[in-house]
């Protein structure tokens, strides 16, 4: 499973409308950027109180990257 697929699976399991989620991967010089776009109504479910859920997602995806290719992963969450 790729990092984008892992991120997408986690995000879609947290929202009520999984079809509205968009996850894209961009190669950067120092690693990988994963851009997550969700509806504004769903942002709270993804970010969580004080960003705890978002940080947990970042930790899981970074750990997966460390097991495979050891690239640094950044995840940006934006809303529509």
Image (spheres, rainbow, N blue to C red):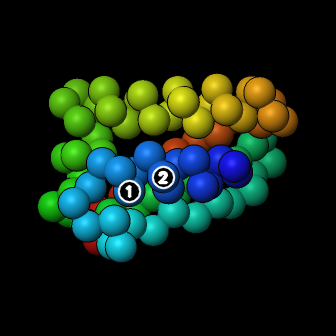
Q: Which residue is mark 1?
A: 12
Residue 10: image location, x then y, percent: 44, 46
Residue at image x 48%, y 52%? 9
Up the image or down, 31 lies above or below 12; here it is: above
Q: Are marks 2 and 1 in contact (CB under 8 Å)?
A: yes
Residue 31: image location, x then y, percent: 75, 43
Residue 48: image location, x then y, percent: 23, 36
Total numbered badges shown on the rendered structure = 2
Q: Nearer the viewer, residue 45 or 10?
A: 10
Q: Quadrant of residue 37?
A: bottom left
Is 76 on the left-hand or right-hand side of 46? right
Residue at image x 51%, y 63%? 23
Binning the other alpha carbons within 10 Å of mark 1 as few (below 14), some (14 to 19) or many (20 upward) gives some
Quadrant of the drawing holding the C terminus: bottom left
Would residue 77 be seen by someone viewing this image from the given angle? Answer: no
Would residue 46 be seen by someone viewing this image from the given angle? Answer: yes
Q: Which residue is mark 2?
A: 9
Q: CA distance from mark 2 to mark 1?
A: 5 Å
Up the image or down, 9 lies above or below 68; here it is: below
């Amino acid at each position: 499973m790729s990092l984008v697929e892992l991120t997408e699976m986690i995000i879609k399991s947290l929202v009520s409308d999984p079809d509205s989620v968009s996850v894209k991967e961009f190669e950067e010089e120092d690693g990988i950027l994963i851009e997550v776009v969700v509806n504004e109504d769903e942002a709270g479910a993804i970010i969580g109180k004080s960003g705890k859920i978002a940080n947990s997602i970042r930790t899981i995806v970074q750990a997966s990257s460390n097991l495979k290719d050891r690239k640094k992963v950044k995840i940006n969450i934006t809303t529509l």
